[in-house]
Image (cartoon, coloured by chain):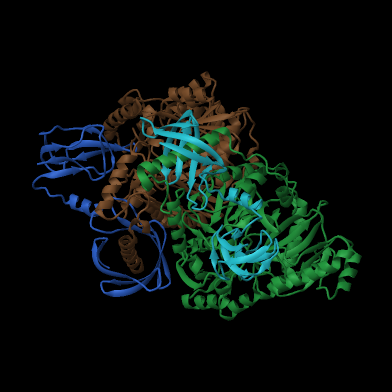
Chain colours: A cyan, B blue, C green, D brown
Amino acid sequence: MRLDLDIEGQSRQVEVVPGDVPGRWQIKIDGTPIEADACLLRPGVLSLIIGGVAHRVVLDADPDEPVLHLGAQRIAWQADDPRSFRRRRRHGAAEGPVTLKASMPGRVIRVLVERGTHVAAHQGVIVIEAMKMQNELKSPKEGRVTELRVAPGDTVASGQVLAVIH
Amino acid sequence: MRLDLDIEGQSRQVEVVPGDVPGRWQIKIDGTPIEADACLLRPGVLSLIIGGVAHRVVLDADPDEPVLHLGAQRIAWQADDPRSFRRRRRHGAAEGPVTLKASMPGRVIRVLVERGTHVAAHQGVIVIEAMKMQNELKSPKEGRVTELRVAPGDTVASGQVLAVIH
Amino acid sequence: MLRKVLIANRGEIALRIIRACRELGLATVAVFSDADRAALHVLAADEAWRLGPAAASESYLRGDLILEIARRSGADAIHPGYGFLSENAGFAEACERSGVKFIGPPASAMRALGSKTRARQAADRAGMPRTPGSVTGLASLDEALATAAKIGYPVMLKAAAGGGGKGMRAVAQPADLASAFAAAQSEAERAFGSGEVYLEKLIERPRHIEIQVLADEHGHCVYLGERECSVQRRHQKVIEEAPSAVVGEDLRRRMGEAAVRLALAAGYTNAGTVEFLVDEEQNFYFLEMNTRLQVEHPVTELVTGLDLVHLQIRIAQGERLPFVQSDVVLRGHAIECRVYAEDPDNQFMPSPGRITRLLQPGGPGIREDCGIYEGWVVPMDYDPMLSKLIAFAPTRDLAIDRMLRALDEYVIGGIRTNLNLFRRILRDEDFRDARIDTGYLDRLLQSADGGSAPTAGAARAAIAGAAIFEALQARDGNSAGTNASYSSAPSSAWKAAARNEALHTRR
Amino acid sequence: MLRKVLIANRGEIALRIIRACRELGLATVAVFSDADRAALHVLAADEAWRLGPAAASESYLRGDLILEIARRSGADAIHPGYGFLSENAGFAEACERSGVKFIGPPASAMRALGSKTRARQAADRAGMPRTPGSVTGLASLDEALATAAKIGYPVMLKAAAGGGGKGMRAVAQPADLASAFAAAQSEAERAFGSGEVYLEKLIERPRHIEIQVLADEHGHCVYLGERECSVQRRHQKVIEEAPSAVVGEDLRRRMGEAAVRLALAAGYTNAGTVEFLVDEEQNFYFLEMNTRLQVEHPVTELVTGLDLVHLQIRIAQGERLPFVQSDVVLRGHAIECRVYAEDPDNQFMPSPGRITRLLQPGGPGIREDCGIYEGWVVPMDYDPMLSKLIAFAPTRDLAIDRMLRALDEYVIGGIRTNLNLFRRILRDEDFRDARIDTGYLDRLLQSADGGSAPTAGAARAAIAGAAIFEALQARDGNSAGTNASYSSAPSSAWKAAARNEALHTRR
């Protein structure tokens, strides 16, 4: 089986073939072969032995951010890594319409603008609250609020689009 | 939904209907109605509140013996309860062919007879071992060994038929 | 003798109290909001009664509903835990009125020590050192300026009803006082419904050290040593220890005896905590008294060998303290990490949601007080503490290394947590050398985070693991266990499923 | 200083040693048989190497393979745990020869104390009381008759190489001696490859009480108090406690000092245990010395505040004991329950197989040393101990009630266990009053088991629960969670699936 794995932002060509002994796998990473002895203890928990070195690889079932836990490491894989998304947002595209996204799961407690309101860069737009912490979401740029997708009391997921500013 | 439940050897007519509120159930046990508030915490683990009293009901996934764990209680349900089977075996049918069954999961380490051997009642037939404990299985009656279904080294499950004596 | 205790709380502390009651042969009544129907304290109690909707104001803060449930269930006592109604004198009185024993101090003592200005007056009466400054609310800016001039800058403005850093302002010079005064007043007004603000001398680089006291209803009071709580982020405790690395026999005795004097003077009973600031010259200053069980009480239990909740209940039953001060001996060292559902990589944003994977630590010297399990959806409605992970060992160094071992065993999937923050702190040289004060953690977080890049071997293992998970998934489907009964990464189809499930879980 | 430790064991003790090594900064090497590929000690170690097939004789008893793995992995020390090679002097020597530190006593001390007759001679040299009787193997029946006549009946025949009750016979009168002698000899021959049998006076209703000793390699030796191990079934310990309810300061000191004398006389180092019988007049008699870490060491750790495995490693590194006898102070009470995979309702038949459900206890005062998890298939190839559940509290009564609380939280599904046996013992009046001896449990098991019938409420809840599980199953299928990722009760289709899976798991 051939795979393109995107791990921590790096893309890898991986070939994985079951070995003759159950639990043994022949793996090529960008052409370099390794042999792994793998045992699935329970769903998502893999005991991996490579050259005598033992690893506990835990597959995180977080739907928003596929990651592996490896010892203390939390390793993002596949394409959609929120941290890279946050990076994008930081040097955010100041031109054209931009979206305002929830930075955490929570409940909308205040909407500070109305559809059509003209907002300055960094002006507060929506306040969400979770676990006793309030978070005021500010407009990433100067412009007009063309969409407001939430109202006070709504429950929002992390990364959900709350408003669009043109 | 109507059910015939066999719990700890007693047969019960049960009717179970989901209530209007999610998690609420209308249940009739042999005609007597009760209301239960149920919440499945994780597979097999049910939080049950009946009239303010809280119960932890755990569904055991043991394939050989369906049971519920309720507090300290281990409650067998459905038909096939090995303990009742053992009861049957104790006052075992001394007439006609009888089967010799494994009293525990383990490995066959000795077969003390051959097919056709004439054995006395309580004569040792097969020795199985598990967890450092050896267990000699004795013939429940005097007769002839007509079948030997296992050989030394075989792995046997609890209750598995090992031999038949006529 | 009490027979049935209603626990007016949730989460780990509700479960911890239920366990203590069961050990003492007392029946237990749990209460829950709609967000907590699947919580472990509901599963563990003998009885469980619904309070109301998720919002605390409609459930765990509804003293009237709680007393009604106590009546219907026949509970003869209420344990308030911490937070919620635990320091509400009005609720304590309502309990007494309805003939239900409130497991805590009398309302009078809560009132006498509840406001920080009143508590400072009580400290003076008890002859206990406190920070220089006012002992009543500031009537005007002029009074503020006069007081500040008298004690000298820098000074601290604080809300009398305050907590958690709200309504607090440090002022370095007279010119800044006016604006800070106004800001503190309005912030206090908003946060606590009282704009009363007072002023005290600012202590530079203080340690936060607190004394656990225990008083029975027959006039006997003891102190159970101190807790070091200087590792804080925004005035929220993150790590607590017992004993403190800088407190010797003599300082412990002086702080302890002062704390006992204050408690006795205020007619205090049951468990309480007197908080102090300790400066670099080891002078200690009274800060406030918490008239309840503290989150961090386990570290005291581990070094004293006592069970504080057992003792709270026995005191509430009118029993005398079963020991005297000289029987209290500290042994070994205990550290507690407060595991929060928050994202250190994203300004510590709260991270509620479903725990999709859970591997918990255990073994020698590890205690975990928590109410979480694999599949539990951490509600967005309450504070983000998931668990209290506590390590005990003969020495501080061993306790730290034991905690690091436990942290390596710990995996929480589906939500973000601060587990890695603890790894960083516990490896930090200043922490290991106990060079900590209340500003320590904020300084650490300013500095760049060192080595946490995966080794070559780890990276290779991660790639191999991911590939094998994919291969198992392709070969066996989910039965291979690449996802649990909760929907799983990484295909988008699975994601959709997971989202749906996530919605279903919130009735 | 050691750098990398190979743990020549499996299960809970391997995991417990790995944790200790990690806390001390030592790298760890796990070894495993084919039956243990999915075991937690393999998951937890830094390295893991396959030994061989499931049978212990082909894996955990293969000292040659273990030393080869030590060489290849660069391990500079081996911890043998208990059982397997832990008391094998030949293996200890082989380790020394290959320059690998054996974490335990020197082979010479193991030899001097290994055989029970030799140990009795050593006891005499150390001036330690022992049961009257022979100190060498009985050459003939005549010698046996003569010895028995001298010390008086009833007498006990024991195998010199014995353990676990094998090759043991109680003899009430001369007429029975001949047959018992022959039987004991042949049984010993079969069990231990040595027919050497000796004879001692039978102590009526003895308690089994043992002393933990710790000796460094510089001639210092201390005792860490006693453990009460009288609750046994067929000479197998089931419950252990520290301290013993019947041992006072003076008896503890006398037993402890005798144990230390024996250890020093035999040139003993590292952790060891001296077992005694104590009669109703509190006379104590040397039984044997176990030259290794004991299964039940945690109860001693909890009442002393020490970590025995840490100390074993530090002693093996040549360090001096970090404390003296007067520093050893006992505090509180600890109880350990050995949770076995066995069926008390069916003559304690072993019950290996897959753990399909697992809810483990926790919270204040509870420690669990185990290597199990939900989904783990308990192998049929090794001893049936699943877990050591340990409770600590200020008093014995509270420790018992805390253990009962923990047992109520514990659910193990898929296999049978002795959890309910502990509930029965811990509620028994004789046990609670500490009226126990080595015959206590067998007598209790003869008596009828009282109340364990479900209450009306419980029965109703069980019926309702079963009905709701069925309804959820019908409505949502497995996604409703009526079965986990492991196949589940009750429909026969599910059963078939489960069996298949069960087969798959045994490669």
- Taking the image as shown, residue C332 lies to the left or right of residue D232, namely right
- Residue lying at the far bottom in this picture: please name it: C97
Residue drawn at the location 24% of the way across and 36% of the way down: B127
Front in this rendered view, residue D442 or C337: C337
Front in this rendered view, residue B85 or C336: C336
- Classify residue C67 by image quadrant: bottom right
- Classify residue D160 by image quadrant: top left
In the rendered view, tell whether residue D495 sits above or below residue D234.
Answer: below
- Residue lying at the far top in this picture: please name it: D97
In the rendered view, tell whether residue D89 sits above or below residue B140.
Answer: above
The x and y percentages for residue C155 are 84, 62
- Taking the image as shown, residue C103 lies to the left or right of residue C211, namely left
- Taking the image as shown, residue D470 lies to the left or right of residue D367, namely left
The x and y percentages for residue D379 are 36, 39
- Residue lying at the far front in this picture: please name it: A96
The x and y percentages for residue A147 are 58, 66
Front in this rendered view, residue D387 or D221: D387
Q: Is residue C392 visible?
A: yes
The x and y percentages for residue D388 are 46, 45
In the rendered view, tell whether residue C70 sits above or below residue D496.
Answer: below
Front in this rendered view, residue D157 or D314: D314
Q: Is residue D111 visible?
A: no
- Taking the image as shown, residue A14 lies to the left or right of residue C408, namely left
